[in-house]
Image (cartoon, rainbow, N blue to C red):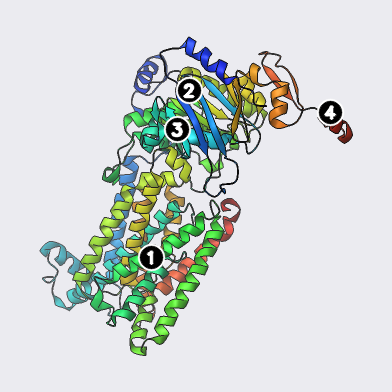
Amino acid sequence: MSGMPEGQAASVSSVTVQSQKARTSGFPREVTEFDWIAAGAVVTVRRRRLVLAGMVVAATTVIIVCTAFGSAHLGGGEVLRAWWRLVTIGRLDEAGGPVGVILFQVRLPRVLMGFLVGCTLAAVGATLQALLRNPLADPYVLGISSGAALGITLATLLAGSSLLVQAPVAPVWGFAGGLIALVVIYQMAQSHGRLPVHGLLLAGVVLNAVLTAFMMFITSIMDPVRSAGLIAWLMGSVTVREWGGLLGIAAYVAIGTAWLWSHAPVLNLLTQGEETARSLGIDVEQAKKRLYVVTALLVGAVVSVSGMIGFVGMVVPHMVRMALGADHRLLLPAAALVGGMFLVISDTVARTILAPSEIPVGVVTALVGGPIFLYFLLTQKSRMV
Amino acid sequence: MPIAHELEQTTEQATDQPAEEPAIAVEHVSFRYDQVSLDRPWTVEDVSFCIGFGEILGIVGPNGSGKSSLLKLMAGLLRPASGAVYVEGRAVSILTPIEVARILAVVPQEQPSLFPFSVAETVSMGRFPHRKMGWWNVGMGAETEADLVAIHQALVETDMVALADRLVSDLSGGERQRVLIARALAQEPRILLLDEPTAFLDLSHQIDMCSLVRRLAGERHLTVVLVTHDLNVASLLCDRVVMMREGTVRAIGTPAEIIRHDILHDVYGCDVMIDRHPQTGKPRVTLPIQAPQDEHRIRAGT
C-alpha cells in the first residue's frame, strides 16, 4: 500500500496535488519514488535499457560462439584470435588465413542471416499476436508464410529463372502473397466479431493446407532440377552466398522491425480490443492497415531468403512475454533479439548435428517449437477461449 | 404512447444556465448496424437530448433498446446515419480520435484479458492521447512525469495502488472494472461514459461502484453518462434518466419523474412495484412475485 491515506485522493490537477500532498503526508518527493514503480508494476526506461543491453551482449556472444561450430573443426583459440584480429584491424578481408575465410566468408554471413531472420520472425509474431489479439498467432501457423512462399513460387514458375537471379524481386512477390493470406486470415478472424483463439488457428491450418497444395502442384509440374531447389528452399534454410545480399536484407529488416517497435504503444492498445483502442485515440483502421502492410513486407522478405521457418514467431514472443510482461515497448525488441539468438542456435544445430551434411533449419525449429506450441495450446485452453 | 418530459426539461435547463452550452448534445441521431437489413427498424432512431456540465445521466431501457449503441455513438465509436453528436459544442464526427480521447473517456464492459499486462500498465494506456507518437517511441517512449502523476492519481482514486503490480487477469471482476475506470481517469477526461458499470458485480461492489462514480463526478467535476439495466442504480446515482425503448427515447427526466409505474409498464411491458428508498426518498423498483398465468392475462386485458 502506498504511504498515503486513501481519503486524501482529492482533487484533480496533478502537479499541484502532488506538491500539496508532499507537505501533508508521506507523499514521495520524486515521482520515481512511487511505490508501484519501485515494485516493477511498469517497465521503466532504466529496466528496458538494462534488459536490452544484456540481450545485445548475449546475442553478440551467441553469434561469436556459433561461428566456432561447423563441419570444419576449428579450435576455440583460433576462433578467438581471428575475431580479435577482425576487431583490431577492422576489415574482414584483412583478418586473413584459412581460419578467417571459413569464419568470416562462410560462417559469419550465414549466422548473421539466421539472426536477422529470427529477429524478424519474432518481431512479426509479436505484432500479429497483438493485432489479432491471439497469443498463439504466428506467420507460419496462420498461413502467411505459405502465402508469401506461394507468391515466390509462382514468380519462379512464371519468370523461368532460378531463385537467386531474381533476389531483388522475390520479396515483392512474397509481400503480395503474404498480404493476401493475411487479409484472408483477418477477414476470417473478424467474421463473427472476434474469432476465438482456436478458431483462428483452425482457419490458419486450412489456409496453410490450401496454399501448400498449390505449391505442391506447382513443384510437380516444374522440371525436377528446379523443383528440387525450390523444395530445399521451402524447407527453410538460412544459407547466404555473399555479403551483398545479406546487407540488402539487413537494411530491409532493420527498418521494418524498428518501425514496428515505434508502434509499440499502438500494439499495446490493440491488445485491449479495437473499440477500446479507438476510444483511447487510435485511428484503428488506419493503424491496422499500416501494420498489416509492414508485417507482410517483412514476412515476404524473410520467406524469400529463408523459406518456411515455423514456430519462431509464436514460441519466442510468447515466452518473452511470460518472462518480461506484455508491454510491447520492451517485448518487441526483446523478442526480436531472443528470436535471433534462437534461430542462430537452431541453425548451428542444423549445420553440425549430422555434419558434414546439413538438415534444414526449419526442421529444427519445428521439432523444438511444435511441442512447445502444443503445450501452450493445451495448458492455456481454459483461459484463452 | 411516448411520454415527453424532454420538452419541459430542456426549457427548465435553458432558464437555469442560459449562456452555457451542454457538455454533450445529441441531435436527431439515427443509427443502424451495417449487417442489419434496411427494412428492419433503426437500432437508434431520431434521438435528441442534452447533457449539462457536471451532470450524471443514466440511460436505461430493456435489452436491445439501443442504450449501448447510443453510448458508442456519443463516444464517436459508431457513426450516426443521420444527425450528429456534439461534445462541448464540437461535432464528434469531425474530431480525430485523439481529440475525442482527450475530452471523453469510455469505460467499456469488463472483458477477459489475454495478455499479461499489470494493473499499472493497463492504467498507463490511458495516457495514450497525451503521448508523443512515432519514432520517438523507439528505445525511449517512456512515461513523462506528468504521465506518472496522472497514473498514480488514477490508481489512488480507484483504490488500486496496492494492486498496481498485479496482473489484470489475476483480479476479480469488481477490481478489473475499477482498473478500467482508473485507465479512463488517467486520460484526464472531462466526460466519462460508462457501459454497464455494475452489470457483473455483487451487491457490495455495486455499492462501491456507485459511490466511486458519485465521488469522481464531484471531485473531478466530471460529466458522467452511464448505461445500466438496473433501474435502482440509475435512480440512486443519476441526476437525470433517459428511458429508451426500441431505439427511441421514451422519456427524459429526474428519477422521480421517470421511474413511475405507467412509464415502466409502457417500456418494459410488465408490472413492477415502486416505493421510496428509505434513505434517499428516491424511487425504488421491486419485482413482484410472478402472478399466476390467468390473473396476469386478466390484468393485461384491463
Q: Is residue A290 left or right of residue A90?
A: right
Q: Nearer the viewer, mark 2 or mark 3?
A: 3
Q: Nearer the viewer, mark 1 or mark 3?
A: 3
Residue at 72%, 23% (x, y): give it: B262
Looking at the rendered structure, whether the residues under marks 1 and 3 are on a common chain is answered as no
Identify which amino acid the numbered label 2 is placed on. Answer: Thr
Q: Position of residue A363 (x, y in %)?
A: 43, 74
Question: Real-space Cα distance between discs 1 and 2?
Answer: 47 Å
- Give the numbered dot on residue B84: 3
Looking at the rendered structure, whether the residues under marks 4 and 3 are on a common chain is answered as yes
Residue position for label 4: B299
Q: Position of residue A299 (x, y in %)?
A: 35, 64
SS at mark 4? helix
Residue at 70%, 20% (x, y): give it: B260
Q: Nearer the viewer, mark 1 or mark 4?
A: 4
Residues at circles 1 and 3 in contact by the CB criterion of under 8 Å: no
Q: Is residue A93 left or right of residue A219?
A: left
User: Label 3: chain?
Assistant: B
- Mark 4: few, some, or many residues within 10 Å (few <14, many ≥20)? few
User: Label 4: chain?
Assistant: B
- Give the numbered dot on residue A350: none
Q: Position of residue B150 (x, y in %)?
A: 39, 28
Using the rendered image of the protein, determine whether residue A146 is visible from the camera's viewpoint: yes
Looking at the rendered structure, whether the residues under marks 1 and 4 are on a common chain is answered as no
Residue position for label 2: B223
Q: Earlier in the sequence, mark 4 or mark 2?
A: 2
In the foreground, A251 or B26: B26
B23 in relation to A77, above or below: above
- Mark 1: few, some, or many residues within 10 Å (few <14, many ≥20)? many
User: Label 1: chain?
Assistant: A
- Mark 2: few, some, or many residues within 10 Å (few <14, many ≥20)? many
Residue position for label 1: A178
